[in-house]
């Protein structure tokens, strides 16, 4: 069997063999979110892709994965404190106005000394090129620098509107935060850490809720920086003792030169970024920009001296806080030991964050100078989610929150399908084509599950009760051979660095082949073969996390409908109440028709779905769809029989039967998420389809019919108007048609003009034209007289 290979950022190039330190076990640490705001789709890309790989390792390859995630924190509390102060409206306006001008001066140099009134007129001349999709320099493609300008302009737009409307703090938050920080941070008592943690705790809960909504498996352990400060201090002391860090003015910095002199390589993940000053500054974080005393600009902080207004903890070097990078090294090592198999995060963390983690951890744990680098064996970096060429980023404000995306644009399954369509380590730009491809994939698989379950329900059993056919012969042989090949192809794709686009194509190809086989009219398809394929597809989509209701070993059939999932935790009788009520209504309405047809009367007398349900309940059945089938089959049979006898009925009874038949299909069952597919000379197929989808289709159909009716009515009115105008024109006798025209002063006996208004004779060329008009009017007028008798 081919080895599992993986793209490892420590070894650029093709995937390398994945060999965990312990047979059958994988230790994995993931950088968690910085919880100061709601999570966005860029986070979803990272954590859903991570979850997919984790699930594949666990549920396809059978590894026991020890998965640890670290929750970071940043503060965003000053504004909340400011809102609690007893300001007057004028004082709030003055504060926001000053913040507005300070924000422009700091972030938009071409708009210095601007106010809310002059801002709209000055904005476009200053930054119109960027707003229209250009660059600051006028060359190349727009990127993060241009995205930041757009973000700042958007923040200024919002604040300017707030000032003009007198909205107080609302709409001005983004310009207020940095201004308040500069005003008041020196006066805040930060020994009370709750000022920085209250908001992040709320955001951490929101993040966890988002991950649950996205069907991301919870981690095996979660760590938080505030719980690890003493261990971080000890960790830093050990690095100093080994000669790879130094103290300066109350801060401690990692000594990159000493680390390299001992035979180690710094910036192994992104060597090309080693001297990137902008990334280095970004990597030092925003809480303390005072880095005096560093030996070299690239040395990074292990411990930062805190200024007034910044959080602090005691340490041998004075009041301070952990450096951004050291947090991860200490907490991950505490949970997973001095070596781990996998470390993962977004690609933007590769340098400096992950490179700095590597350096400080290897300096702490390992005998530097021997060239050994074994804190992490495999670094996995998830690709960016992009918008118009710029990465989706909270700091750029070009993001859609996960909550909003799931409420307005995506389902969790649909979003995961989009991410599965791309490789985890590649950048993804969600385009209309990608959305359409994902929608089509999901729809194809969904329809396949729906059809298979409907056919099995029609047969009254699953494969366990179907006559066992040899899969080496008969009509199902070729389909089973295709399943065998799909199994091999899927495994090969997943062994190739978790190639999910390849895996998705394998699933789609098999489903399409099964659909062709199922709809082949030349031979009766083997339900056993189709069910085996459907159960295999069910297992794979479960492994990939596409069914939130599924649990390992994923041995069900299809994903449950939304209604069935919601009812899964109810007792059976409660779960089937809507279906039982629908059947009771339909049964009563059929009785009320008073049809004498024997087939109808027999059905009404003999159907007993309550007894069928009771038998299923006694057997221990808990699948809501199966429990509902007695009621749904009963309703479907009644409708089928109504349609069968309708041709023999009198017009009034026929109209009533057709109306009831349509109502059963389009309303009674549609509202329950049940679709009836009519079949020739066979009972209707009962399918479970999300009610929202069916109702949307019904409303779309109704809208199309209404539009056709509107167009038909407009056409009728247009015809009537044209007819009315035709006869109004025809009513005029040819003798009179030119006499009201001021262009002429004399006419002949037939009413044709002979002299123009200026006394000149009408030109011969014009006389010929007027004669043709006269003849047309005479013919039209004759038609009028023939139709109406007189003018």
Image (cartoon, rainbow, N blue to C red):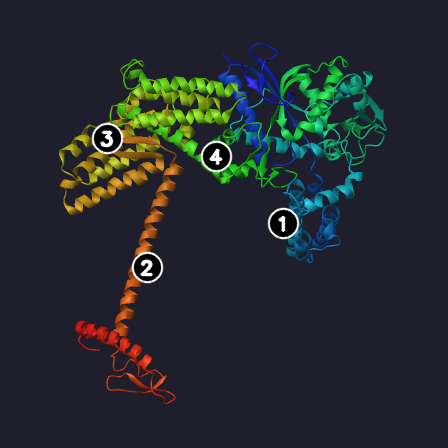
Of the residues tagged 3 and 1, which is closer to the observer? Answer: 1
Extreme-top residue of the structure = 23
- Distance Cα–Cα, label 1 vs label 2: 44 Å
Of the residues tagged 2 and 3, which is closer to the observer? Answer: 2
Label 3 belongs to which residue?
A: 683
Label 1 belongs to which residue?
A: 131
Q: How many labels does the image show?
A: 4
Label 4 belongs to which residue?
A: 411
Q: Disc 2 vs disc 3: Cβ atoms closer than 8 Å?
A: no
Q: Disc 4 vs disc 3: Cβ atoms closer than 8 Å?
A: no
Label 2 belongs to which residue?
A: 714
Extreme-bottom residue of the structure = 759
Of 600 and 272, which appears nearest the observer? 272
Where residue 103 appears, as percent x and y from the top left, is 72, 47
Q: Which of marks 4 and 1 is nearer the N terminus?
A: 1
Q: Disc 3 vs disc 1: Cβ atoms closer than 8 Å?
A: no
Say what secondary structure mark 1 lies in: helix
Q: Which of marks 4 and 2 is nearer the N terminus?
A: 4
Where residue 587 appears, as percent x and y from the top left, is 24, 35
Q: Which of marks 4 and 3 is nearer the N terminus?
A: 4
- Distance Cα–Cα, label 4 vs label 2: 40 Å
Q: Residues within 10 Å of mark 3 (few under 14, many from 20)?
A: some
Of the residues tagged 4 and 2, which is closer to the observer? Answer: 2
- Quick check: can you spot residue 242? yes
Residue at point 49% right, 17% down?
60
- Distance Cα–Cα, label 3 vs label 1: 61 Å
Q: Which of marks 2 and 3 is nearer the N terminus?
A: 3
- Distance Cα–Cα, label 4 vs label 1: 32 Å
């Amino acid at each position: 069997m081919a080895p599992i290979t993986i793209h490892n950022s420590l070894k650029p190039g093709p995937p390398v063999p994945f060999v965990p330190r312990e047979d059958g076990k994988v230790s994995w640490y993931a950088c968690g979110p910085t919880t100061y705001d709601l999570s966005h789709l860029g986070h979803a890309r990272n954590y859903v892709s991570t979850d997919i790989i984790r699930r594949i390792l666990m549920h396809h390859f059978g590894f026991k994965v020890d998965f640890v995630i670290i929750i970071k924190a940043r503060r965003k509390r000053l504004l909340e404190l400011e809102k609690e102060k007893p300001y007057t409206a004028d004082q709030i306006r003055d504060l926001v106005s000053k913040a507005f001008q300070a924000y422009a001066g700091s972030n938009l140099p071409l708009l210095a000394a601007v106010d809310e009134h002059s801002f709209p007129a000055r904005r476009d001349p200053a930054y119109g090129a960027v707003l229209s999709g250009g660059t600051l320099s006028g060359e190349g493609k727009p990127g993060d620098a241009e995205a930041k300008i757009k973000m700042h302009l958007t923040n200024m737009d919002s604040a300017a509107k707030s000032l003009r409307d007198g909205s107080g703090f609302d709409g001005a938050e983004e310009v207020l935060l940095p201004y308040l920080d500069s005003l008041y941070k020196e006066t805040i008592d930060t020994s009370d850490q709750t000022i920085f943690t209250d908001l992040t705790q709320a955001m951490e809960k929101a993040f966890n809720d988002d991950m649950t909504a996205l069907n991301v498996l919870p981690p095996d352990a979660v760590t938080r920086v505030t719980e690890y400060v003493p261990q971080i201090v000890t960790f830093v002391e050990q690095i100093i003792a080994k000669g790879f860090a130094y103290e300066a003015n109350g801060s401690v910095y990692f000594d990159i030169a000493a680390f390299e002199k001992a035979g180690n390589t710094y910036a192994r993940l992104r060597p090309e970024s080693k001297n990137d000053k902008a990334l280095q500054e970004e990597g030092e974080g925003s809480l303390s920009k005072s880095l005096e005393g560093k030996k070299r600009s690239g040395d990074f902080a292990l411990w930062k001296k805190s200024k007034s207004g910044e959080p602090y903890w005691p340490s041998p070097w004075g009041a301070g806080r952990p450096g951004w990078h050291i947090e991860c090294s200490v907490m991950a090592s505490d949970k997973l030991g001095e070596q781990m198999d996998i470390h993962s995060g977004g690609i933007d963390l590769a340098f400096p964050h992950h490179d700095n983690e590597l350096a400080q951890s290897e300096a702490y744990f390992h005998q530097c100078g021997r060239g050994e680098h074994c804190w992490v064996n495999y670094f996995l970096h998830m690709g960016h989610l992009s918008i118009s060429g710029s990465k989706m980023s909270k700091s750029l404000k070009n993001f859609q929150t996960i909550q909003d995306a799931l409420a307005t644009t995506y389902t969790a399954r649909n979003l995961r399908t989009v991410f599965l369509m791309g490789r985890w380590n590649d950048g993804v730009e969600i385009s209309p084509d990608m959305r359409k491809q994902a929608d089509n994939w999901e729809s194809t698989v969904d329809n396949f599950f729906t059809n298979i379950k409907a056919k099995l329900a029609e047969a009254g059993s699953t494969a366990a009760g179907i006559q066992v056919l040899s899969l080496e012969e008969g009509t199902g042989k070729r389909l089973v051979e295709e399943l065998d090949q799909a199994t091999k192809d899927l495994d090969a794709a997943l062994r190739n660095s978790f190639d999910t686009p390849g895996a998705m194509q394998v699933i789609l190809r098999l489903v399409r082949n099964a659909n062709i086989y199922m709809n082949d009219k030349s031979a009766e398809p083997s339900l056993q073969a189709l069910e085996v394929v459907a159960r295999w597809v069910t297992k794979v989509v479960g492994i990939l996390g596409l069914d939130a209701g599924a649990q390992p070993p994923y041995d069900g059939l299809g994903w449950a409908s939304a209604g069935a999932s919601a009812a899964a935790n109810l007792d059976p009788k409660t779960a089937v109440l809507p279906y039982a009520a629908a059947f009771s209504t339909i049964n009563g309405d059929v009785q009320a028709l008073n049809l004498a047809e024997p087939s109808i009367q027999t059905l009404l007398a003999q159907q007993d779905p309550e007894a069928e349900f009771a038998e299923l309940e006694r057997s221990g059945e808990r699948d809501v769809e199966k429990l509902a089938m007695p009621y749904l089959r009963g309703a479907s049979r009644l409708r089928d029989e109504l349609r069968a006898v309708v041709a023999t009925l009198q017009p009034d009874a026929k109209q009533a039967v057709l109306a009831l038949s349509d109502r059963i299909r389009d309303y009674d069952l549609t509202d329950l998420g049940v679709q009836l597919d009519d079949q020739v000379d066979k009972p209707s197929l009962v399918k479970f389809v999300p009610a929202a989808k069916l109702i949307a289709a019904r409303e779309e159909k109704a809208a199309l019919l209404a539009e056709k009716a509107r167009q038909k009515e407009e056409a009728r009115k247009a015809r009537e108007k044209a007819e009315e105008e035709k006869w109004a024109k025809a009513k005029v006798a040819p003798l009179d048609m030119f006499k009201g025209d001021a262009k002429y002063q004399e006419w002949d006996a037939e009413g044709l003009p002979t002299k123009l208004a200026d006394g000149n004779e009408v030109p011969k060329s014009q006389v010929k034209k007027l004669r043709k008009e006269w003849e047309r009017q005479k013919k039209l007028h004759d038609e009028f007289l023939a139709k109406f008798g007189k003018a």
